[in-house]
Structures are given as C-alpha cells and as structure tokens.
Image (cartoon, rainbow, N blue to C red):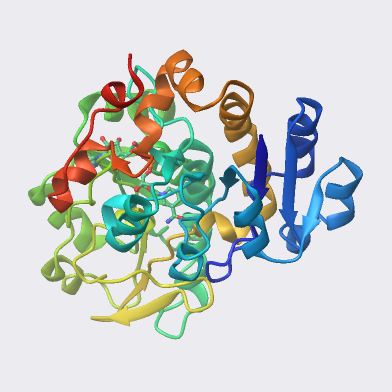
Amino acid sequence: MIIGVPKEIKNGEKRVSLIPSSVKTLINDGHTVYVQRDAGSAIGFYDELYEEVGAKILDNARDIYAKSEIVVKVKEPLPEEFELFKTGQTIITYFHLAVEPELLDVLIKKKITAIAYETIQTADGSLPLLRPMSEIAGKISVQIGAQYLQTSDYSCGTVLGGVAGVMPAEVVVVGAGVVGLNAAKVAYGMGAHVSILDISPKKLAYVEDIFHGAVGTAMSNEYNLKKLIKNADLVISGVLIPSNKAPKLITEEMVKSMKKGSVLVDVSIDQGGIFETIETPTSIDNPVFEKHGVIHFAVPNIPGLAARTASISLNNYTLPYVLKFANKGFIAAVKSTPELYKGVNTYQGKLTNPEVAKQFGYPFSELSMLIGF
Ligand SMILES: NC(=O)c1ccc[n+]([C@@H]2O[C@H](COP(=O)([O-])OP(=O)(O)OC[C@H]3O[C@@H](n4cnc5c(N)ncnc54)[C@H](O)[C@@H]3O)[C@@H](O)[C@H]2O)c1
C-alpha cells in the first residue's frame, strides 16, 4: 500500500499521525510511506529521522494526497484540504462528523472511505482510539484551568490546591469517562476539592472505589448540576454520547450563577460542547473568552498542546489498525477486526454511520451489505 502522512494544519496543531518508528514498521511490512516535509519537525521528529527509516519526503500536501491510497491524519480535514482528496481514497483520522456537515458532503461526493478513530468501538462499548487523546486532554484540562484561575485578566488569582489557612478550589467534572477520570486524578492530586457527575451509576461507583470517597460523586441531572456549578471555581466537561452532538447540560443561567473569575474547560467541544455559553470552538492561538465574568476555554485539539507525548501515545493505539488496513486490505481488515466496523463512517462515499445519517437526514447504508458479510 501507499500511505501518506500530511502535515497537520489546524490552528496550533503540531501532532503528527505516524512517528518514525511506526513508519519503519509499515516499511518493514512492504509498504511505501510518503511524509510531508516538516510534518513532525516541530516536535523533534525531523525529516532525516523519517528518511533514515525509508520514508520518502514530499514538499506539499497536494503531492501526499495525489500519491497515497491511504492518508493517515490526526485532526479532521479542513476546507483547504477538501479539494486535495483523491476520489476513492481511504482517510484515517479523527473526523467528528456529527459537527462537520461540510466535510461529510465532500466525503460523499468524492467517494471517500473515512475511518474515524473516535468511533472505532470494542464489544464492551469502549472507544480505544479516543482513549489516548482523552487521557491527555483530561490531565491537561486541569493544568489549563489552574493556570487561568491564577493568571488570567479576568481571574481573581486562586491557587487550585489552596494553601494552609485558605480553602482549595472547587472543581466540578461532568462525565466520568476517560477525560473525566484523568481530570479528577490530576485535580485531586493538586489538592483541589473535586466532585464528578455522570449518568452512569456504574461509572460513579468506579470513581468511589479508586478515590476511596475522596472525590465526591453525583448523578448528572439538572438539579445537581445547578447546585454544584454555582459554587465551582473550575468546571471541566468530559461528556460523550458517541457519534452525537454533546447535550447542552450547562445553561446560560447556570453560568451566570457562577463566581466571577471562575473557569470552564469544555473538553467535549469537539462534539459541540456542553455549555450553552460556548457557541463555537476557540483555538490554540486564541483559547479563551469571557462571558458573564466567567473564563471559557473551548479548544477542540487540546492534546495539540502536548504534541510530542500525544503523537507517541496516539501511535501506540493507532498503528495496529493502520497495519491491518495496509496488510490485509480494507474488506479483510474490517471482517477480521470487529471494532473497525463502527469506525467506518463512509465507505466509498456511502454513509455508514447511522447516528450521523440520522442527524443530517441523509440515507444510511449498512456496511455489511456493501462489503458482503
Ligand atoms: N477537546 C479536545 O481536545 C478533546 C480531546 C480528547 C477528547 N475529547 C472529547 O471529550 C469527550 C469525552 O471523551 P471520553 O473519552 O472521556 O469519553 P468517554 O466515553 O470515556 O466518557 C464520556 C462519559 O460521558 C458520560 N455522559 C454521557 N451523558 C452524560 C450526561 N448527560 N451527564 C454526565 N455524563 C454523561 C458517559 O456516561 C461517559 O462516562 C468526547 O467528546 C471526546 O471527543 C476532546
């Protein structure tokens, strides 16, 4: 197979989809890998390291897309990239199609096979390729929140963990999945007073078990959210309803009730976010805005702030799947690896993700009918 690695172009994004060790594995298996010049340079994966393992460096994204059968990316393609797609190509990346209708139209028109990392799902319902980035985003979200509580133009200057004689900050985490758990771990470790909410009692029982009651748990409903949000210094969202837009759980009224200088970190913004006061994502270059005296952070690519760790961690999880597609071909890979079935969002331009089809009122095609099994 011919595999292409374009340089990421989302604002502030320095991650690279395949690191040199992964490229070496693919080349050892007989594949050709094209890497765009400087795709990994910003995080220490220089072109020479790719060349040493046998990759071919190309000057621009146009050539990468033109030459590759499979394009492996990190973030969803942006409009500048749409015209580069080659009809019939396979693209593997985070797509978040529930909030990307324009991109979906291009995938359909150009008959693209789109494998979305975030919808690859194992039999127990877990999302193995969302996990590594959620782990990082969850951890960093607290560091980001702590920084804005201390230093921002709008903040009052609060130390997250408190000091002797001064109470710690109140941190509320909504969603007890991978983002939520990692945020709770860091916030607790920094000495904050932490509460976490979810709709799943099982998830809350797990929090109770691992923190031995040191982190408060509550069911996620309007009543509890209203009460906890009012006293929060930092609110972190880690809610996900797979393939759907996130529900707007935190209303404008709830935000208005918060203390001036408190901070919201909407990690779920890549699926639309849970705060009514956040209409569009912010960016790494311009990450926050203030509304009702509250600092809003809504960057959809938080792991891009820790791009080297994030790229290595991402590769630990994605490479086995990329290898399956490259070594076996699309149909055999999907048939032999059940979790890939849900990862296929479009197959040769046919929309195979039922939730996305429902959301936009588009015709849905069952993948098994298209590839015959
Ligand atoms: N902004 C970024 O850079 C970034 C990075 C990584 C992940 N994310 C996003 O963060 C979100 C969470 O990811 P995750 O891996 O933790 O998902 P996850 O599936 O592990 O956890 C999601 C949790 O949300 C809970 N939930 C669902 N509805 C809820 C509700 N009404 N109230 C409270 N909890 C509810 C679920 O029960 C689950 O425990 C996803 O949208 C993911 O794409 C964003």
Of 209 and 311, the residue lying toward us = 311
Residue at coordinates 36% horizontally, 58% vertically from top-left?
106
Residue at (64% x, 38% y) in the render? 315
Q: Is residue 307 left or right of residue 207?
A: right
The x, y position of residue 326, in whole percent, is: 62, 29
Tell me if 370 is positioned left or right of 159 in this view: left
- Judged left or right of residue 243, residue 132 is right
Q: Is residue 128 above or below residue 180?
A: above
Task: Give percent across and percent down for residue 92.
Answer: 51, 43
Quarter assignment of residue 33? top right
Q: Residue furthest left?
A: 223
Residue 172 showing in the rendered view = no
Residue 73's spot in the image, x, y percent? 57, 50
Q: Is residue 280 visible?
A: yes
The residue at 41%/17% (across/down) is 338
Expressed as whole percent of the image width and height from the top left, the position of residue 162 reads 48, 60
Where the C terminus falls, by quadrant? top left
Question: Which quadrant, please, contains the N terminus?
Answer: top right
